[in-house]
Amino acid sequence: MLRGETVHSPLPQDLPWWMPDHFVFFGVLYAVLGIIGLGLAWTFYKSWKDVKEQPDH
């Protein structure tokens, strides 16, 4: 990181984004990671909801 930089980003800053192969690769990568993250969040939500709905033993 250069001196004085304060902005952090998950995107690589040194890639030429005007090249279609970089744009497509990272676009698909972050889309897939987002879908996986949403799936995990949904699974945790459903399991938490199911645990809360069970009667106490």
Image (cartoon, rainbow, N blue to C red):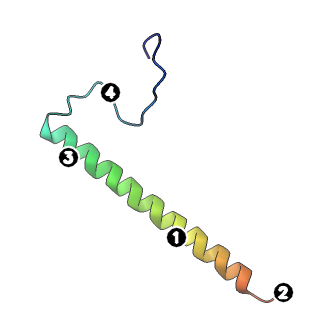
User: Marks 4 and 1, Cα distance to the nearest angstrom?
Assistant: 31 Å
Q: Earlier in the sequence, mark 3 or mark 2?
A: 3
Numbered mark located on residue 42 in the image: 1
Q: Mark 3 = which residue?
A: 24
Q: Which of marks 3 and 1 is nearer the N terminus?
A: 3
Q: For the point 46% across and 29% down, which residue is it?
A: 8
User: Marks 3 and 1, Cα distance to the nearest angstrom?
Assistant: 27 Å
Residue lying at the far right of the rendered structure:
57
Q: Which amino acid does label 2 sit on?
A: Asp
Q: Where is residue 18 in the image (x, y as percent from the top left)?
A: 15, 33
Q: For the point 45% across and 26% down, which residue is it?
A: 7
**Please, what secondary structure does the residue beneath circle 4 have?**
loop
Q: For the point 42% across and 13% down, which residue is it?
A: 2
Q: Do the residues labelled 2 and 4 touch (CB within 8 Å)?
A: no
User: Marks 4 and 3, Cα distance to the nearest angstrom?
Assistant: 16 Å
Q: Mark 2 = which residue?
A: 56
